[in-house]
Image (cartoon, rainbow, N blue to C red):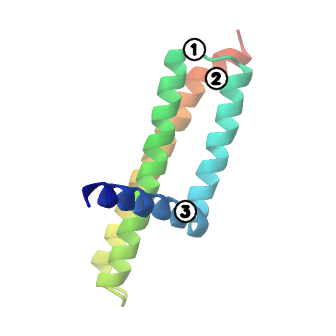
Amino acid sequence: MELRRRVDSFKFAFAGLADLFRTQVNARIHLVAVALVSWAGWYWQISAFEWMIIVLCFMLIISLEAVNTALEYLTDLASPELHPLAGKAKDVAAAAVLWSAIGSVVIGGLIFIPKFFP
């Protein structure tokens, strides 16, 4: 029974990922960015340490995008009518995604700009 619950938890998590990328335009944009940066990392043969940092950035942005989406779903359920606090909750969650994306662009610049100007 316990194994079945574990398997089900993975199914639910993958269903959540599928929903995230199917319904959220920004998540798909981030996924395209992941692909492009991965290609660039392969092309310029970045170091293992640089890959670790880049992958952490990928994980942070996609994870925060998922948390933002979950918060939006919950907020819409709890407050179907417009409410200033519901809007603030959504705005702050979106700000977390934006902040991580800005940080990731800075990190990407620190890693990739020296590849352009050796």
Tell me the mark number nearer the camera, choosing from 2 and 1: 1
Mark found first going from the N terminus, 3 or 2: 3
Q: Which residue is mark 2?
A: 112
Residue 12 position in % (x across, y down) = 41, 63
70 sits to left or right of 113:
left
Tell me the mark number nearer the camera, choosing from 3 and 2: 3
Q: Which residue is mark 3?
A: 18
CA gap between label 2 and label 1 equals 11 Å
For image coordinates 30% across by 60% down, the residue present is 5
CA gap between label 1 and label 3 equals 31 Å
Using the image as rendered, state which of residue 110 and residue 42 is in the foreground.
42
Q: Determine if residue 114 is in view.
A: yes
Mark found first going from the N terminus, 1 or 3: 3
Question: Which secondary structure lies at badge 3?
Answer: helix
Amino acid type shown at disc 2: Phe
Using the image as rendered, state which of residue 114 and residue 35 is in the foreground.
35
| Crowdedness near tag 2: few (<14), some (14–19) or many (≥20) residues, C-alpha within 10 Å | some
For image coordinates 31% across by 79% down, the residue present is 84
Q: Outermost residue toward the front?
A: 1
Amino acid type shown at disc 1: Ser
Mark found first going from the N terminus, 2 or 1: 1
Q: Outermost residue toward the top?
A: 118
For image coordinates 69% across by 24% down, the residue present is 42
105 sits to left or right of 64:
right
Q: Which residue is mark 1?
A: 47
Examine the rendered structure and indicate whether residue 55 appears above or below residue 34. above
